Every structure is written in structure tokens, then in C-alpha cells.
Amino acid sequence: MDARSIDSGQIGELAEKMADKGLAYLCVWGPDCERVHDIFDEIEVQRDLEPTDDNVIMTTWHSAESLEESLWFFVNCAFPAEAYEQSCKEWIVCSDRK
């Protein structure tokens, strides 16, 4: 999506809600996706969960790739940390691309 016009506070609220619901892996793509990625990472740090290799919420940004390449990565390479393997059942893909 194009995140350039979205307020950082709104992105932070979404990050908190998604983390509360069990977010395990986030892949972001599109204009300003690096900022979205960084905000999700900041929220994880603020939650003070002391992430380890086994329970970290993984995040990646794909600003230099096509939507198709980013989706391929999400489907083929985005595996959750061990702590989320049993509970990670849903995949969500959203795009504002027309």
C-alpha cells in the first residue's frame, strides 16, 4: 500500500492491535513501507517482551521489489518464530493496488 499519507500514530495503533491478536510475521510493500516496518518494530520493543529467536515477531520490507515478488516471499519464505508455529493459522494480504 502507499503509506505516505497515513499518520504514524494510526500505524502504531494497528501494530498494537495486530500484536495483541497474535501477529507472527509482517511483510510490507509499497511507498513508505520502510516506515511502516519500523513502526511495527518500535511497538514490539515498547511492549517490552524481550524477544528471542524463538518468539520474535518477524518483519520485512520490500520497497525494491514488485508486488508479485513480495507476495512470493510472503508465501514461500515468511515462516513464524517457533513460539507461533502452532497458533499461526491465518494469512492476511491487503493491497490498495488497483
Image: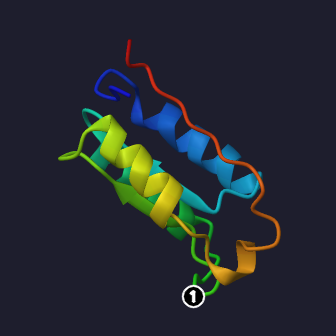
What colouring style does the render use?
A: rainbow
Q: Nearer the viewer, residue 30 or 73?
A: 73
Please say if 23 is above or below 49.
above
Q: Residue furthest left?
A: 64
| Residue at the spot 53% in from the left edge and 30% down from the top edge | 94
In-image side of 32 versus 46 (left or right): left
Q: Nearer the viewer, residue 51 or 67?
A: 67
Q: Nearer the viewer, residue 34 or 63?
A: 63
Q: Position of residue 39 (x, y in %)?
A: 42, 51
| Residue at the spot 56% in from the left edge and 37% down from the top edge | 93
Check the picture and name the quadrant holding the C terminus. top left
In-image side of 50 versus 45 (left or right): right
| Residue at the spot 22% in from the left edge and 45% down from the top edge | 65
What residue type is disc 1 on? Answer: Thr
Q: Position of residue 27 (x, y in %)?
A: 45, 51
Please say if 46 is above or below 39.
below
